[in-house]
Amino acid sequence: MLKDVLGPPATLIKGIPPVRDIFKTLAQDEGIQNSALDFLQKRLTSGATKLSSIGEVVFNNAIEDIKNSQKILLSEQIGILTGSYLTVTGIDALKSLGENGALLILNHSSKGHLRGYGNTIAVSKAISDNTGQDPIWAHGVDKSTFQDLARPKLSHSIETITIRDKNDNGLSRITKAVAEGRIVAIYPEGDSSEKLKRGVANAGRLIATSILKGIPVIYGVSYFDTNSNTYKTAFFNIDAEKIKSVYESLPKSERNKNTGELRGQKVIDFIMIQIAKNLPQEMQGEYGLEKVLRRALKKTA
């Protein structure tokens, strides 16, 4: 199958194609997409937090639906988390949106079922129960990783917005979705982790630009508490004027060709600090008090 996908040997004799081109070709093959889903299925279920027998059946059925290009709602896959509890606070932040759409900023914890993607299901369920809609999940793409061979199938079955590279912030698609009353959720850390990672500057630029365009932005916290076997999810309003102030407060001495990136980093750091305050101390990572102070001192040195 690999030979068929890559083409005749002559194409390889002249030199090995760039990895991104190989993966682009591979990603178009349905058999390879399904194999990638099989790999992803095994990897997600090999984490420390095991699914219950019912949860395993629901998850396996969801994977089969995705392989068969069926549309699914993550909120309806809550059975995957059977045996665990879900608590939701800050419902007012969701209710305040009314019929308006919004951009939702969340931490990306790897703790819990499916190596942390149980949190994505828990958040989807909480939003669906309180707004009547599942969020659209925005995600990046790395065409050099095996996981992204499953992206075409995943993106077809689960409503997503793909942010393709650093030159594509997805703002036009997010703006369109929000204008239609949808909630678009993003993980500004990029990769999942047991502790908070540094948010990426592009996410901060996206947030600030959204606010400047009048798009509502809220943030949320979601993590799996192993002691109580509970997914704890909370939502909060963001002070839009404060974000504008942070974005526009870059000193003249720091304004250069990287001004946009520096501004974006300040915005995402500000929001991630708010997220950290609502997480257990051992999960605060790059936004724990000690590391935040260390970065601040480094800037003034």
Image: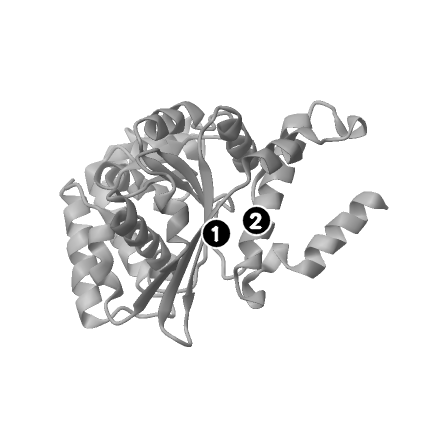
Q: Position of residue 239 (x, y in %)?
A: 55, 40
Q: Nearer the viewer, residue 264 or 234?
A: 234
Quarter-of-image position of residue 10: top left
Q: Position of residue 175 (x, y in %)?
A: 39, 26
Residue drawn at the location 39% of the way across and 36% of the way down: 102
Residue drawn at the location 57% of the way across and 67% of the way down: 282
Whether pointer 1 and pointer 2 mark residues with C-beta atoms closer than 8 Å, the reply is yes
- Residue flagged by tag 2: what amino acid is it? Met
Q: Which residue is mark 2?
A: 272
Q: Residue 157 vs residue 201: left or right? A: left
Q: Nearer the viewer, residue 195 or 124?
A: 124
For label 1, the SS is loop
Q: Residue furthest bottom?
A: 227
Q: Residue 129 vs residue 68: left or right? A: right
Q: Which residue is mark 1?
A: 107
Colouring convention used in this rendered image of the protein: one colour
For label 2, the SS is helix
Q: Position of residue 288 (x, y in %)?
A: 64, 59
Could you tell me how far apart the alpha carbons at marks 1 and 2 are, in whole angstroms? 8 Å
